[in-house]
Amino acid sequence: MQDNKDVYFINEISFEQIRTPKLTKPEKKKIKVIRDLLEGKFNGPKAAKKLKITNRQVRNLKRQVIDNGDYGVIHKNHFNKPANTYDEDIRTELAHLYRTQYKGTNFTEFARIMQKDHGFTLSRSTIYNILREKRIRSPQRKKTKRKKKTTI
């Protein structure tokens, strides 16, 4: 019989090679409380009070930790890519177009050009976020600001 102790499956992803998951602070707290619960240091209602969740959720967490180890407290959607993300190809193409053809254009104008001429259906804010992620900054305004007249 083989030892399945270090093999975990979450959303059909095997975690055999990863021994210690990277946990957030709340997840670490959940693990600590559930381990204490499993060791018998306190009961379910006390664990629920510490974690500020219901007894039923504590029972579910306990079962998940017994079945999956530390991965039991990680949200099951954690490893999935969000549905509204854009492919890396689109992101690199946008950055390449901006750097080669449209350098010096502000992001709002660039977004308008992309929608009109190149057929991109991305919003201005999405294009802004993609370009900022690629470490591209929108050019600063050239017009000097007027000084306000102050009355004494």
Image (tube, rainbow, N blue to C red):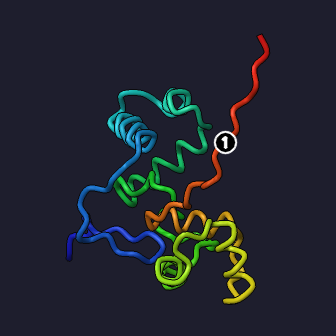
Q: Residue at x 45, y 67 (%)?
A: 134
Q: Residue at x 20, y 75 (%)?
A: 2
The image position of residue 6, as x and y in percent, is 25, 65
Work out whether 104 lies above or below 60: below
Count of numbered marks: 1
Q: Secondary structure at mark 1?
A: loop
Please name whichever residue, 3 or 123, is drawn nearer the observer in this view of the structure: 123
Q: Residue at x 49, y 48 (%)?
A: 61
Left or right of 4 on screen, residue 67? right
- Look at the image and tell me in which quarter the C terminus lies: top right
Work out whether 58 lies above or below 103: above
The image position of residue 144, as x and y in percent, is 63, 46
Work out whether 56 lies above or below 5: above
Work out whether 95 lies above or below 57: below
The image position of residue 55, as x and y in percent, is 59, 38
Mark 1: amino acid: Lys
- Look at the image and tell me in which quarter the N terminus lies: bottom left
In this figure, which residue is indicated by the disc labeled 1?
145
The image position of residue 74, as x and y in percent, is 45, 55
